[in-house]
Image (cartoon, rainbow, N blue to C red):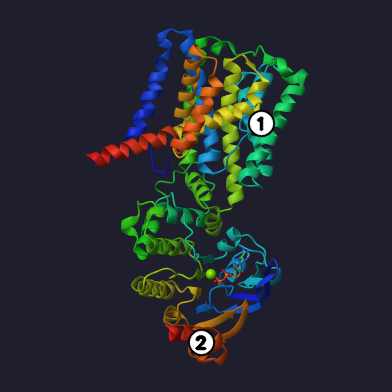
């Protein structure tokens, strides 16, 4: 988590990137949509981990910024007929500002109080999306997003999505491994000590929240385009819970863990839904299993296995 | 250098620091001694901004710093270590010290400069200074207790302070570790021209380093002066050294 980009990690990243780029060759609309969605949620979960894994706080309301990015994109593209770039920039900027305002209040608190306040703010965002029917479509959702013609088709959009997400993940990686990322780890590990070496811990937590919110907004704006719509479910608390579970399942102490968690959970959900209607039950079991047996998630498990193998040699 | 006036702090009804006035002179090595519960740690917490005093003021180099948060006080050149180990357990020994340097260089909001290469040489220098260069890549939480104590010292030194407050720097160390630590602290303080304020309950440590000693008892200063004078002070003998003798006598 704290080191530089090692060769195996870099190789794995490039492999995943190439494999993702090859997905459209399978000529399956189902798979293209599935992988597009997985990529979006991977970015979403990675963004949440800046708050959880790096700053050491738990957010129960991260869906709010995903939804803010999504609705902003949908409304600007469709209602106001903005073109892609300005709409995208504005949606990222608005996610930044919205999370900045919320973070101002949330970072006054810590622990459970922080978590509860993030939940409260996300309910507020959900309430606005639900009530402001003329702008957001209310509980009918915002349907019929105008996606620019050059990425209107499935495959071009998939590649657009891949480029945006790969870039966002790379930038997020740099941020998490920067001087900022390292100081943030210190805040997570021991806020008192971090204060005593001259770090303004509240300011650091504010920035972590804002970075997380901004990247969630990017994920959300892609979501609005891939679905040609935005729905209040995206702002509702179960969505925050889902992305939280993805992060924990993948492993919060690893940068890429949450992306692995997002992919695993998504595939598992699709698989489960093929056979039963009891996805919530399965989800509950998964959560239980993580908490009891995998406190560091799948990434932590992989590391433990690797250590065992190295020791066995 | 550090001027404290009428400092007062109570927890509930319990008075932990009672009207303490105190001055630290530039360049001196000053020890605060007193039995457990005397209020030494509380005194440090008040001076460094970890706790708010109920009354009284703290001035550093003529500047009133009462009520300022620790991260701003540190920036003025007043660093401290902790009696109870206070490090970043899940980070490497190297990173523990590096973060302090990142903060000192005000790089903590650099989002796009990778941490891996930052402040490397100086971090290694500090680790070498406290004898932790071989443990650089180990997790700080997995170090032996004595080594964690040394790491604690390296983190405080990384701030490049003018005044260093050490809260029982040898607490929990074996006699040989203690001796080594004292030698190191004295050396570093001399080499860097540090003004040193430290608390201790171990008398040998105190007389090994201090130019001046202040005795704290039930939150009040009962004596202050040169080591020899304090040692022979009848009140001190009665409440502090006397206790030790009584213990020794009983043993
Ligand atoms: N945060 C606190 N709340 C309540 N009582 C405290 C607190 N901190 C210290 N005390 C009490 O204040 C007294 C002085 O403690 P301390 O400053 O740690 O003494 P010393 O460091 O000299 O051993 C002790 O009786 C301790 O129980
Ligand atoms: Mg103490």
- Left or right, B3 with respect to B233, comes to right
Looking at the image, which is closer to me, B205 or A177?
Answer: B205
The answer to whether mark 1 is within 8 Å of ligand 1 is no
**x, y percentage for residue B204?**
42, 81
Of residues B234 and A123, the one nearer the viewer is B234
Instruction: Report the residue at 36% width, 57% height from top.
Output: B124
Residue drawn at the location 50% of the way across and 34% of the way down: A248
Distance between the Cα atoms at labels 1 and 2?
A: 69 Å
Specify the quadrant that holds the N terminus of chain B.
bottom right
Which quadrant would residue B224 be assigned to in this image? bottom right
Label 1 marks a residue whose chain is: A
Instruction: Determine whether A233 is above or below B65 in the image.
Output: above
Q: What residue appears at the point 44 percent right and 87 percent down from the top-left corner? A: B249
Looking at the image, residue A210 lies above or below residue A89: below
Mark 2 Cβ and ligand 1 under 8 Å apart: no
> Percent from the top left, x then y, of residue B133?
33, 59
Q: Which mark is residue A94?
A: 1
CB-based contact (under 8 Å), mark 1 and mark 2: no
Q: Nearer the viewer, residue A15 or A146?
A: A15
């Amino acid at each position: 988590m704290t080191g530089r980009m090692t060769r195996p990690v870099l190789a794995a990243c490039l492999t995943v990137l190439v494999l993702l780029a090859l997905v459209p060759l399978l000529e399956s609309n189902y798979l293209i949509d599935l992988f597009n969605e997985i990529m979006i949620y991977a970015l979403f979960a990675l963004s949440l981990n800046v708050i959880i894994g790096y700053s050491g706080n738990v957010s129960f309301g991260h869906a709010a910024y995903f939804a803010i990015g999504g609705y902003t994109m949908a409304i600007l593209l469709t209602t106001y007929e903005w073109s892609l770039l300005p709409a995208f920039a504005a949606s990222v900027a608005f996610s930044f500002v919205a999370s900045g305002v919320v973070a101002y209040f949330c970072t006054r608190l810590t622990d459970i109080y922080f978590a509860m306040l993030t939940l409260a703010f996300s309910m507020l965002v959900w309430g606005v999306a639900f009530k402001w029917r003329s702008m957001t479509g209310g509980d009918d959702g915002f349907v019929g997003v105008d996606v620019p013609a050059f990425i209107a088709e499935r495959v071009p959009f998939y590649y657009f999505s891949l480029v945006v997400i790969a870039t966002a993940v790379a930038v997020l990686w740099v941020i998490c491994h920067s001087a900022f990322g390292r100081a943030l780890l210190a805040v997570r590990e021991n806020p008192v000590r971090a204060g005593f070496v001259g770090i303004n811990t509240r300011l650091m937590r504010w920035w972590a929240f804002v970075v997380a919110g901004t990247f969630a907004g990017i994920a959300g704006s892609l979501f609005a385009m891939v679905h040609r719509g935005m729905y209040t479910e995206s702002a509702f608390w179960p969505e925050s819970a889902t992305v939280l579970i993805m992060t924990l399942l993948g492993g919060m102490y690893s940068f890429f863990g949450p992306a692995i968690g997002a992919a695993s959970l998504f595939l598992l959900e699709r698989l489960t839904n093929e056979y039963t209607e009891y996805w919530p039950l399965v989800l509950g079991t998964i959560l239980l299993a993580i908490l009891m047996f995998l406190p560091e998630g799948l990434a932590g498990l992989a590391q433990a296995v690797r250590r065992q193998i190295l020791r066995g040699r | 250098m550090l001027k404290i006036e009428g400092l007062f702090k109570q927890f509930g009804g319990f008075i932990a620091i009672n009207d303490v006035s105190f001055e630290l002179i530039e360049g001196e090595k000053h020890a605060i001694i007193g039995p457990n519960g005397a209020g030494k740690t509380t005194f440090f917490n008040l001076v460094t901004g970890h706790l708010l005093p109920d009354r009284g003021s703290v001035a550093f180099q003529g500047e009133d710093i009462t009520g300022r948060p620790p991260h701003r006080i540190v920036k003025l050149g007043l660093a401290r270590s902790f009696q109870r180990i206070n490090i970043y357990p899940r980070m490497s020994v190297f990173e523990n010290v590096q973060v302090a340097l990142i903060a000192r260089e005000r790089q903590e909001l650099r989002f796009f400069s990778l941490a891996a290469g930052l402040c490397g040489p100086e971090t290694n220098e500090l680790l070498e200074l406290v004898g932790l260069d071989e443990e650089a890549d180990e997790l700080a939480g997995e170090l032996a207790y004595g080594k964690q104590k040394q790491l604690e010292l390296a983190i405080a030194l990384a701030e490049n302070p003018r005044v260093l407050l050490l809260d029982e720097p040898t607490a929990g160390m074996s006699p040989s570790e203690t001796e080594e630590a004292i030698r190191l602290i004295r050396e570093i303080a001399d080499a860097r021209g540090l003004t040193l304020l430290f608390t201790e309950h171990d008398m040998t440590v105190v007389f090994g380093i201090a130019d001046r000693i202040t005795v704290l008892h039930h939150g009040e200063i009962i004596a202050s002066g040169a080591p020899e004078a304090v040692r022979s002070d009848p009140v001190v003998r009665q409440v502090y050294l006397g206790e030790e003798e009584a213990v020794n006598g009983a043993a």
